[in-house]
Amino acid sequence: MAVIGSGFGGLAIAIRLQSQGYDVTLFEKNAQPGGHAAQLKLKGYTFDMGPSLITAPAIIGDVFHAAGRRMEDYLTLEALDPFYRIFYRDGSVMDYSGDAGAMQAQMHDFHPADAANYERFMQAARGIYDAVISDGLGAKPFLSWRTMISFLPRALKLNALLPAYTFVKRFFRDARNRFAFSFHPLFIGGNPFRSPAVYLMIPYLERSGGVWFSKGGMYSLVQAFVQLLRDCGGSIRCNAEVNEILVNNGRAVGVRVGDESFEFDAVVSNADVTHTYQQLLPEQFRRHWTNNRLDKTKYSMSAFLIYLGVRRQYPRLLHHSLILSHRYKELVRDIFDNKILADDFSMYLHVPTRTDAGMAPAGCESMYVLIPVPNLAADIDWDVTGPLFAAKVLAFLEQDFGLEGLQENLDVMETYTPRDFARDRNSYLGSPWGIEPSFLQTAYFRPHNRSEDIERLYFVGAGTHPGAGVPGVLLSAEASEKLVMRELHQESSARSIVSD
Ligand SMILES: Cc1cc2nc3c(=O)[nH]c(=O)nc-3n(C[C@H](O)[C@H](O)[C@H](O)COP(=O)(O)OP(=O)(O)OC[C@H]3O[C@@H](n4cnc5c(N)ncnc54)[C@H](O)[C@@H]3O)c2cc1C
């Protein structure tokens, strides 16, 4: 069995299938495994380059469990409280957490009626969570209309198909409260004004399961999965970019890496779905995902990142902080639809040194700034714009936001642009989140966990069902594992009946 790509989805399916008795080889383009969860180490500072926020530890635990191991033997997780701090443009602040009383007190300051609706909102979000997580829809491959149609009555009853923001607006009046409970689709590359409210299971998932940090950063989860895969007997080949998926008689039969071809019973791609279809499979094999259809598909935003090692600390910033612009809907529209780099920006800051002093030299701060920006369909030359934009963001943080002495205390500064996502990780249009999770690109409408055209070709990761985010891609691995097991097992049983 070949797995292409060592993102969390690729690592998880490799572990699951190896544990089921398949002999798995994982091919990774880069020197380091982990995909977007790569790690950058410079001058004593350690940065997680991408994901930073761990939710749903139970879903992570399921991967260890599938391999007959215990997560605690590989990872040390620490709960964060509050989950994050939101700095609004008017100077007000919210410490967002799972503590109902603390949340209601803050929401009350913004609008008393909103505080009273907090529990009502959470119960509504719980209904969605129950459908997607507890009842297993997230880990169920949506291959047919039947699965989709059977979910529709429940989805309609839960209002889960409304745009997320519209759903939230029904509960809260103050713009700040509306933001705090509606922005979560952005975590997974969704536009809160058109992603279905099904993604509002995230606030409930955070409240019920907490927000966690793994000692050593998110990369320690990559290392734990790599170790687990090796412990189960699987192998990883880094610096091995797959250039072609070999197809014979409509069936995936192997992969080509440079000049070498390798035969396999089945292939699972964790590489970006559009990259897989466009670059690894000739169009003659694709009736469903033609180049034309892939061109018409809507892709998510990208991100501009600045990794900063600073010779001082800023305790005002929590482990996770959001610093918001005065604009919400309009800014999101500029990023997703108008595809322009607006004058204003909202940002997420990751400051792991707040929790783990080992991520930087003593007394120093390791931090990254993430700004959602348009993907590469925008007319932006990041070679020119990148340095100017970074300078503007640093000036904002120091002068407007008040991080005193930020620029004169910089030990390390690196940027990462949409162009880098495309070049380093084969993310189509430089979008690490891939296919946008709008209603018409969710569940059955998303690329399936199994190719519609090529037998024994499966998908895991952000571009397939259920979607992006660490919990999402881990669930995709569970969904794809079910398909592989069902289909390969059925075939081998049929073969053994014939040979009997
Ligand atoms: C900046 C940022 C912050 C984020 N924050 C969070 C967060 O806090 N919490 C959260 O849950 N999620 C977060 N996410 C989303 C989350 O990181 C991703 O959805 C998830 O990690 C994607 O995993 P994946 O399985 O799709 O694989 P990917 O990470 O996309 O990895 C795919 C792998 O395939 C490899 N590859 C591509 N083409 C080939 C080829 N031809 N041959 C061999 N290998 C190939 C790539 O090099 C890469 O290693 C964030 C994402 C980003 C970018």
Image (spheres, rainbow, N blue to C red):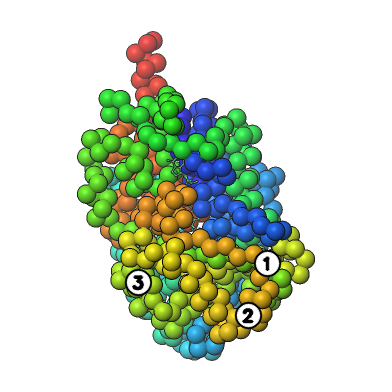
State left or right for residue 417 relative to residue 236: left
Are circles 1 and 2 on residues that touch, CB within 8 Å?
no
Instruction: Residue 102 in the image: state x and y as whole percent.
Output: 60, 79
Which residue is the site of mark 1?
411
Which residue is the site of mark 2?
403
Are circles 3 and 2 on residues that touch, CB within 8 Å?
no
**Counting other residues with Cα less than 10 Å from the Cα at mark 2, is it few (<14), some (14-19), or many (20 or more)?**
some
Q: Taking 101 as reference, is 239 above or below it?
A: above
Which residue is the site of mark 3?
340
Instruction: Residue 85 in the image: state x and y as whole percent.
Output: 58, 76
Q: What mark, if any, has residue 475 been given in the picture? A: none
**Viewer-nearest residue: 121 or 194:** 194
- Name the outermost residue toward the top: 500
State which tag comes first along the sequence, 1 or 3: 3
State which tag comes first along the sequence, 3 or 2: 3
Q: Secondary structure at mark 1?
A: strand
Q: Residue at x 54, y 58 (%)?
A: 50
- Mark 1: amino acid: Asp
> Quarter holding the C terminus?
top left
Q: Residue at x 54, y 80 (%)?
A: 396
The residues bearing labels 1 and 3 have C-alpha atoms spaced at a distance of 31 Å
Q: Nearer the viewer, mark 1 or mark 3?
A: 1
Is residue 147 at least partly visible in the picture?
yes
Q: Nearer the viewer, mark 1 or mark 2?
A: 1
Q: Residue at x 26, y 44 (%)?
A: 289
Q: Residue at x 24, y 55 (%)?
A: 296
Instruction: Residue 132 in the image: state x and y as whole percent.
Output: 42, 56
- Mark 3: amino acid: Ile
Instruction: Residue 397 in the image: state x and y as whole percent.
Output: 57, 79
